[in-house]
């Protein structure tokens, strides 16, 4: 277990989060295959060490498929809500089609090209792997995207009132970091 993962686990334990035994390699592989993504190496190590449970956490071992799929689709679906209802349309996407269905189809195509976000807790997300993809933790609610931690350890400190992690350079995740940096639609 890496030092970062070990510290995150200890901070969760001290915050009283219910922690079950970690997922086996076979369970991790099964989750990735079933839902069509790869955990980053750090996230795999974390989930191999412990599986946080309780309200807001994803139960990767026994959770209902429909609930997990909903959590996985939330970042894109909630951003599409803003395309449909709140005039979200980045300038880099070109002119917004007048027909809403065409606009939504175009937006979906654009979202297929951005890194996939994987739920951590409630509406906090990390970028998918593969490999050791460094990722900040984002709080995602529609296109209101904010940084909630520079990495998993920093996130645990922020979310669960644990001592802060040592500062590290915040990694950049295409599109999601731009939203978190509060760029205007015309700057995306």
Image (spheres, grey):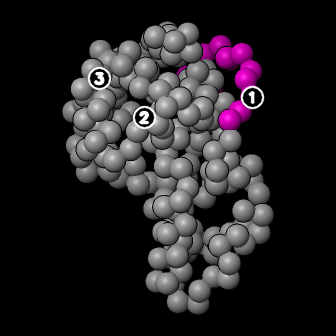
Report helix, strand or loop for mark 3: helix
Q: Residues within 10 Å of mark 1 (few under 14, many from 20)?
A: few
Taking the spot 48% from the left edge, 41% from the top edge, the residue there is 128
Image position of 115 with respect to 11: above or below: below
Mark 1–mark 2 distance (CA, rounded to whole Å):
21 Å
- The spot of residue 84 in percent (x, y) is 53, 75
Q: What secondary structure is the magenta-colored segment mainly? A: loop
Which residue is label 1 attached to?
169
* Image marks 1 and 2: residues in contact by CB distance under 8 Å: no
Mark 1–mark 3 distance (CA, rounded to whole Å):
30 Å
Residue 163 falls inside the magenta stretch: yes
Which residue is label 2 attached to?
39
Q: Residues within 10 Å of mark 2 (few under 14, many from 20)?
A: many
1 or 2: tag closer to the N-terminus: 2
Q: Is residue 73 left or right of residue 144?
A: left
Q: Is residue 89 visible?
A: yes
Residue 141 falls inside the magenta stretch: no
1 or 3: tag closer to the N-terminus: 3
Disc number for residue 122: none
Which residue is label 3 attached to?
25
User: Quadrant location of the C terminus?
Assistant: bottom right
* Image marks 3 and 2: residues in contact by CB distance under 8 Å: no
Residue at the extreme front: 131
3 or 2: tag closer to the N-terminus: 3
Q: Is residue 4 left or right of residue 105?
A: right
Q: Which residues are magenta?
A: 158-171
- The spot of residue 33 in percent (x, y) is 28, 42
Taking the spot 46% from the left edge, 83% from the top edge, the residue there is 101
Image position of 81 with respect to 7: above or below: below
Residue at the extreme bottom: 98
- The spot of residue 63 in percent (x, y) is 25, 37
Q: Quadrant of residue 88?
A: bottom right
């Amino acid at each position: 277990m890496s030092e970062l993962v070990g510290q995150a686990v200890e901070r969760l334990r001290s915050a009283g989060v219910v922690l079950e035994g970690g997922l086996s390699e076979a369970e991790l592989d099964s989750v990735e295959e079933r839902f069509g993504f790869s955990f980053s190496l750090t996230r795999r190590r974390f989930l191999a060490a412990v599986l946080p449970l309780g309200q807001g956490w994803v139960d990767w071992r026994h959770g209902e498929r429909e609930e997990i799929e909903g959590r996985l689709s939330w970042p894109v679906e909630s951003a599409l809500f803003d395309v449909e209802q709140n005039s979200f349309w980045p300038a880099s996407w070109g002119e917004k089609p007048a027909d809403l269905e065409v606009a939504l189809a175009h937006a979906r195509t654009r979202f297929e090209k951005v890194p996939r976000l994987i739920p951590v807790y409630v509406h906090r997300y990390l970028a998918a792997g593969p490999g050791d993809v460094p990722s900040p933790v984002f709080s995602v609610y529609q296109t209101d995207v904010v940084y909630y931690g520079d990495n998993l350890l920093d996130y645990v400190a922020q979310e669960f009132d644990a001592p802060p992690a040592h500062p590290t350079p915040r990694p950049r995740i295409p599109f999601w970091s731009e939203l978190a940096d509060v760029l205007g639609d015309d700057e995306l």
